[in-house]
């Protein structure tokens, strides 16, 4: 394509808004290369395991109006801000605002692309950000599709390049090659603070800031994040500041008013649910319940945090309890401190109602480890509905034990009804349909609860060590692979085996640097050849990922054993060799090519290459 020729997005269009923007743009093989490098569940309209949070109809009107007016502001030379930072603490409702404004701008035809980072859902890798944005722009704007396809066709490896190169080649160059007078498209990036590492976060800001200094770029960016010092410093630098507008979500009168509106609406809903079979005596609730004094106190305790308000209403309306009694528990006097302390106190109060905390701790730790594997590409979505039942199988619990352990934390964790009573009687299609109902997948309502559990300074005696959870699951998965084949064939046994086969190594890798002696012993005694099935036919990508996931396991072996016991490492590696790996997988050329495509490789070292050489997986003369 001649970059000097004039190519209009919409020929002859001036200041056009595209309503219900859908273009029938074919996805050819070149664009498919880009699609494979995207994060499939990171956009506002993606089907995710967790339903997206949205602003309550009576809340956030001022903030949303500010965003709408910012988007409508016409360029007036250097005084027009092209980037907006939506800043706020955890639980302030940033993602709900981002989701809502994306839906508004999508209807108006202003939304160019969006990306929702999420640590709790595994969307933390910044390498997927710009390919995902570029793909959305290519699908939305036909002329951009041509320009972006050309970049990918000229160099398919661009999708694996540094983010600076990705942005320049996949977004900046194609967009600047177009001459258009249409209204600028808006790109929304939510949860930047949940992107892996401060360096990546500041690099993303730097890339965007540099591009926006070219004021002919028909794009504007909204970035939502916590006010982390490095993010604030980078955004307020001389390089970014002239381009920047800021909306700070803080505890003010308007935030209190919005939370009061939310409380009134939710408590009205609770009073209306008199026919719910699990709610006891709801029909006896006074129309004026709760008292205004209680509402005022709850608003004050929320301190502007919508997650606090949402957790309160879920706790009060939890099935099987009297709403009045639950509210009385919440209103009992207790010390109050800063915002985070108040949220932590709420979590502590809820967890104090759990009768057997040690069992619930084990279940919560295992579920959080199961729900957040390192490799999102390997997430078997249809199994998530069955995670509680799989957990019962792995840990040898009695039927219903996991559900009982989670009974008192339904305000913090959504747990779907068990399929145990009907699973084996359903035909294949009925069963598959139930598993795919994403609104009925087990999930944590908000990442702040996971953060609380995993931070020993905040949760103290309630702390859950994720390394321990992953280690326990790894051992249970390995045992399941050996033992389940001896049990009668059933759906629950099969899906438990499927989970174990899929994730045993993920859990091994995530055990961290702590003592892994029990895990190493389990691995050393594990018979891979008889217990683990490797599909005979895999795509090249799957071959690569499978191979390197198991290579990463060697890190666990080396860290977990004293030097005299390194022979056990060789036993494990020898077992891995029985999986059917061919020497070409680990040839020097293969390793060199793979290394060139990676940014951070903590597990790769000369030690592992030597071990592979000992196993004749790399021809000695070529090393």
Image (tube, rainbow, N blue to C red):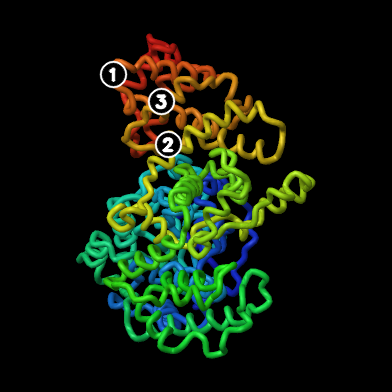
199 on left or right of 194: left
* Mark 1 crowdedness (10 Å alpha carbons): few <14, some 14-19, many ≥20: few
Mark 2 element type: helix
* Mark 3 crowdedness (10 Å alpha carbons): few <14, some 14-19, many ≥20: many
Position above or below: 549 against 142 = above
Q: Residue at x 48, y 20 (%)?
A: 525
Residue underneath mark 1 = 563
User: Earlier along the polypeptide chain: callout 2 or callout 1?
Assistant: 2
Q: Most extreme residue toward the left, as rendered?
A: 238
> Residue 569 placed where, x, y %?
39, 19
In the rendered image, the quadrant that contains the C terminus is top left
> Which label number is shown at residue 287?
none
Q: Which residue is drawn at 43% across and 13% down?
A: 615
Q: How far apart are marks 2 and 1 (CA)?
A: 21 Å
User: Earlier along the polypeptide chain: callout 2 or callout 3?
Assistant: 2
Is residue 515 at all visible to an observer of this figure? yes
> Residue 64 placed where, x, y %?
44, 79
> Residue 154 placed where, x, y %?
47, 42
Residue underneath mark 3 = 520
The answer to whether marks 2 and 3 mark residues whose Cβ atoms lie closer than 8 Å is: no
**In front: 383, or 39?**
383
Q: Which residue is drawn at 47% across and 51% down?
A: 360
Position above or below: 27 against 222 = above
Q: Distance between the residues labelled 2 and 3?
A: 10 Å
Is residue 255 at all visible to an observer of this figure? no
Mark 1 element type: helix
27 on left or right of 372: right
Residue underneath mark 2 = 471
């Amino acid at each position: 394509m001649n970059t000097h020729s004039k190519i209009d997005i919409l020929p002859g269009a001036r200041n056009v808004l595209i309503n219900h923007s859908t273009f029938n743009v074919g996805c050819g093989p070149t664009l498919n290369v880009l699609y494979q490098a995207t994060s499939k569940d990171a956009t506002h309209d993606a089907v995710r395991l967790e339903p997206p949070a949205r602003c309550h109809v009576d809340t956030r009107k001022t903030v949303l109006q500010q965003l709408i007016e910012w988007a409508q502001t016409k360029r007036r030379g250097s005084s027009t801000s092209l980037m907006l930072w939506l800043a706020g603490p955890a639980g302030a409702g940033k993602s709900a605002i981002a989701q809502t404004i994306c839906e508004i701008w999508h209807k108006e035809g202003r939304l160019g692309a969006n990306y929702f980072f999420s640590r709790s859902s595994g969307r933390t890798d910044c390498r997927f950000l710009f390919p995902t944005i570029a793909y959305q722009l290519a699908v939305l704007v036909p002329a951009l599709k041509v320009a972006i396809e050309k970049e990918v066709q000229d160099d398919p490896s661009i999708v694996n390049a540094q983010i600076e190169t990705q942005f320049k080649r996949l977004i900046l160059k194609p967009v600047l090659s177009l001459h258009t007078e249409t209204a600028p498209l808006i790109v929304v990036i939510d949860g930047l603070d949940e992107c892996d590492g401060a360096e990546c976060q500041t690099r993303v800001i730097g890339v965007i800031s540099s591009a926006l200094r070219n004021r002919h770029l028909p794009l504007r960016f909204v970035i939502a994040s916590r006010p982390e010092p490095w993010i604030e410093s980078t955004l307020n630098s001389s390089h970014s500041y002239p381009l920047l507008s800021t909306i700070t979500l803080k505890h003010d009168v308007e935030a209190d008013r919005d939370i009061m509106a939310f409380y009134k609406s939710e408590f009205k809903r609770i009073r209306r649910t008199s026919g719910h079979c699990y709610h006891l005596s709801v029909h006896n609730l006074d129309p004026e319940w709760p008292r205004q004094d209680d509402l005022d106190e709850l608003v004050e305790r929320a301190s502007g945090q919508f997650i606090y308000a949402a957790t309160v209403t879920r706790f009060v309306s939890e099935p099987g309890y009297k709403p009045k009694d639950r509210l009385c528990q919440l209103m009992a006097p207790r010390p109050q401190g800063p915002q985070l302390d108040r949220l932590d106190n709420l979590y502590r109060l809820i967890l104090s109602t759990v009768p057997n905390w040690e069992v619930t701790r084990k279940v919560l730790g295992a579920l959080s480890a199961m729900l957040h594997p390192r490799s999102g590409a390997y997430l078997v979505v249809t199994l998530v509905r069955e995670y509680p039942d799989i957990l019962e199988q792995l840990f040898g619990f009695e039927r219903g034990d996991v559900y009982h352990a989670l009974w008192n934390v339904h305000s913090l964790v959504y747990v779907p009804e068990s399929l145990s009573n009907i699973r084996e009687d359903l035909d294949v299609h009925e069963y598959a349909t139930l598993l795919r109902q994403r609104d009925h997948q087990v999930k944590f309502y908000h990442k702040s609860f996971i953060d609380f559990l995993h931070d020993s300074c905040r949760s103290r005696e309630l702390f859950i060590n994720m390394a321990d959870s992953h280690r326990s699951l790894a051992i249970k998965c390995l045992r399941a692979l050996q033992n389940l084949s001896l049990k009668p064939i059933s759906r629950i046994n099969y899906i438990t085996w499927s989970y174990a086969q899929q994730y045993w190594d993920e859990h091994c890798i995530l055990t961290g640097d702590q003592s892994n002696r029990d895990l190493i012993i389990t691995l050393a005694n594990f018979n891979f050849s008889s217990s683990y099935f490797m599909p005979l036919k895999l795509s090249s990508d799957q071959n690569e990922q499978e191979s390197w996931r198991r290579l990463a396991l060697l890190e666990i072996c080396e860290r977990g054993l004293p030097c005299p016991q390194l022979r056990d490492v060789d036993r494990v590696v020898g077992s891995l060799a029985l999986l059917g790996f061919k020497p070409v997988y680990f040839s020097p050329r293969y390793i060199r090519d793979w290394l060139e495509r990676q940014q951070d490789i903590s597990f790769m070292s000369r030690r592992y290459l030597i071990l592979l050489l000992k196993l004749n997986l790399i021809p000695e003369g070529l090393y």
